[in-house]
Amino acid sequence: MNSNRIALLTYSTKPRGGVAHTLSLAESLAELNQDVHVYALATGREFFRQVDVPYTLIECPEIKYSSMDEKIKGYIGIYTDYLQSVTSEYEIFHAEDCISANALLNLRDMGLINYYVRTIHHIDDFTSKSLIECQLKSIIEPDYVITVSKFWKRELSEKYSLSPIVINNGVSIKNLVNSDDTHTKENAKKSFNVNGAKVILSIGGIEPRKNTITTLRAFNIVRLALKTKGEKLVWLIGGGETLFDYMEYRDEFFSEVENLGLELDKDIFVLGNVPESKMQSLYNSADVFVFPSIKEGWGLVVQEAMAAGVPVIASGIEPMTEYLVDEENSLLISPMDYDEMAQKIIMVFDNLGLRSKLIENGRSTAIIYSWENAARKHIDFYNEILKEKGVSIEDKRAVGDD
């Protein structure tokens, strides 16, 4: 397989879906003999996990921006300024978010690159003027667009007249072991100080798109039902650090926690970023994975949970219905219906036959989606681009010999 020189760009070092996608794709490309380098904006911290490819962290000064609009403009400017010095080093520049895509747009407008690739995971409902503009430009301006599902391909076609190719996300099966035996699960629960309790797990933090407040209401219904039987229920919330400000929603969430008489670090554990080394244990601690997201690009963590042997309850929305089948490999719900969500959680706890079925079929589904397969499709796409642009193998060898 011919080696291409590829720059993969992301906006952060935090454990967000797009960042995780960038790192897993980069490592899988490198395993297939591609010359890959990852670039990311950073604010004094390393990536959330070990990274097995070369990377550069572009430091963003600790400036107190006057607004989100100023912050976004500043980040795009920092990215643009840094990348000007490396434009001759790669044949493919591939952005995974709107900030890095706008930096590449600037480089193209300056005549420093001729084309670039953008993966669009989903379209956000931003309120910031700069973020709205950033996202729009990152959708309509790239020369080549990849998206991660048939649903988003259709949305981009209907709303923006684009014709992206679809390359589904992968899941790192080798890092996630199906461990639903009692001993492993109880040891995992002890490591998060929730031993003896039934555990609901959600990943994605506290934000509107993840529908966290609806899950809170369902959690409380199930908690009260289990309490009548002398059983304890806890909720672990992992991840969720983001560039964007959801403080108003978070305040509403914590206010409702207090109004329901719930306690943090007793009933609900807001874990924040969980180190990669502890993710297997986190999944093992869970009796059910609940993901009632209102909007998703694909749902990487859903497939991770399935790979780790955790029964999944998720929104019955596209694109997740491209791989989730109700009562076969998951239980699907209307995302805003917390009564239905509570009912399905209790079903997973009480119906051992259903639980076993969801675990077995979930693992079988996750295995279908490998990062190696996704990386091979990316390489094919990159090669088509280079062929279209007239970059031959001989050209690449000549550059490599300089």
Image (cartoon, grey):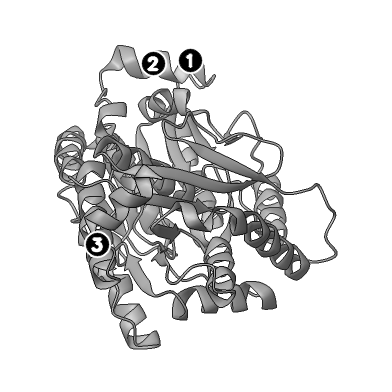
Could you tell whether 361 is left or right of 336 in the image?
left
Could you tell whether 135 is left or right of 344 in the image?
right
Q: Position of residue 244 (x, y in %)?
A: 65, 59
The local crowd at label 1, few if under 14, some if 14 to 19, many if 20 or more residues have their Cα within 10 Å, is some
Mark 1 or mark 3, which is nearer the start of the sequence? 1
Residue at the disc numbered 3:
381
Q: CA distance from mark 2 to mark 3?
A: 45 Å
Residue at coordinates 72% horizontally, 57% vertically from top-left? 247
Q: Note whether 16 is above or below 280 in the view shown.
A: below
Check whether the beta carbons of the residues at disc 1 and disc 2 lie within 8 A of each other.
yes
> In which quadrant will I find the C terminus?
top left
Q: CA distance from mark 1 to mark 2?
A: 6 Å
* Front in this rendered view, residue 313 or 361: 361
Q: Amino acid at mark 3?
A: Phe
Residue at coordinates 49% horizontally, 68% vertically from top-left? 113
Q: Position of residue 142 (x, y in %)?
A: 44, 74
Disc nearest the viewer among 3 and 1? 3
Question: Residue 363 sits in which quadrant?
Answer: top left
Residue at the disc numbered 1:
190
Residue at the disc numbered 2:
186
Mark 3 or mark 2, which is nearer the start of the sequence? 2
* Front in this rendered view, residue 135 or 339: 135
Could you tell whether 263 is left or right of 18 in the image?
right
